[in-house]
Image: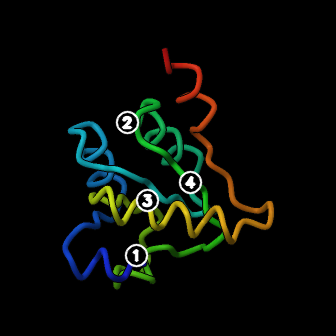
């Protein structure tokens, strides 16, 4: 599904692009590789600040699936693609995937 989003121009890859899209409100979903450094993870989580879902995926190179190999962080910019990817992740979850920002979003809901 990330490949379709990339073909539609609805994917941003890399730490800086993802952080900018999250802060500007354009990012609807962030995918973070499981082996991403602690510094990058913290930077992305700070940028998402509880308003963008961040999923840590077991794949070491999520950028490969959208033609941006070597990128550890992806942002999906389209709500429809984000919902479909999140549903696919939840359906395929065998306990290894983690929505690492879900608890923060729940705490902030009124």
The part of the image, by quadrant, that contains residue 76 is bottom left
Mark positioned earlier in the residue sequence (2 or 4): 2
- Mark carried by residue 104: none
Left or right, 74 with reference to 5: right
Q: Residue at x 58, y 20 (%)?
A: 107
Left or right, 17 with reference to 39: left
Mark positioned earlier in the residue sequence (1 or 3): 1
- Mark carried by residue 2: 1
Left or right, 98 with reference to 49: right
Q: Which residue is mark 3?
A: 83
Q: Residue at x 36, y 82 (%)?
A: 3
- Mark carried by residue 47: 2
SS category of the residue bearing label 3: helix
SS category of the residue bearing label 4: strand
The location of residue 56, given as percent across then percent down, is 60, 56
Residue lying at the far right of the rendered structure: 95
Q: Mark 1 or mark 2, which is nearer to you?
A: 1
The Cα atoms of the two marked residues, 2 and 3, are separated by 20 Å
The Cα atoms of the two marked residues, 1 and 2, are separated by 21 Å
The part of the image, by quadrant, that contains residue 82 is bottom left
For residue 86, above or below residue 102 = below
């Amino acid at each position: 599904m990330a490949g379709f989003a990339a073909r539609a121009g609805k994917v941003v890859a890399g730490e800086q692009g993802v952080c900018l899209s999250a802060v500007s409100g354009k990012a609807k979903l962030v995918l973070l590789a499981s082996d991403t450094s602690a510094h990058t993870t913290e930077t992305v989580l700070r940028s998402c600040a509880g308003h963008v879902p961040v999923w840590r995926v077991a794949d070491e190179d999520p950028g490969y699936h959208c033609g941006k190999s070597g990128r550890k962080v992806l942002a999906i910019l389209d709500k429809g693609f984000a919902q479909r990817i999140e549903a696919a992740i939840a359906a395929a979850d065998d306990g290894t995937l983690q929505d690492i920002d879900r608890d923060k979003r729940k705490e902030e809901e009124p």
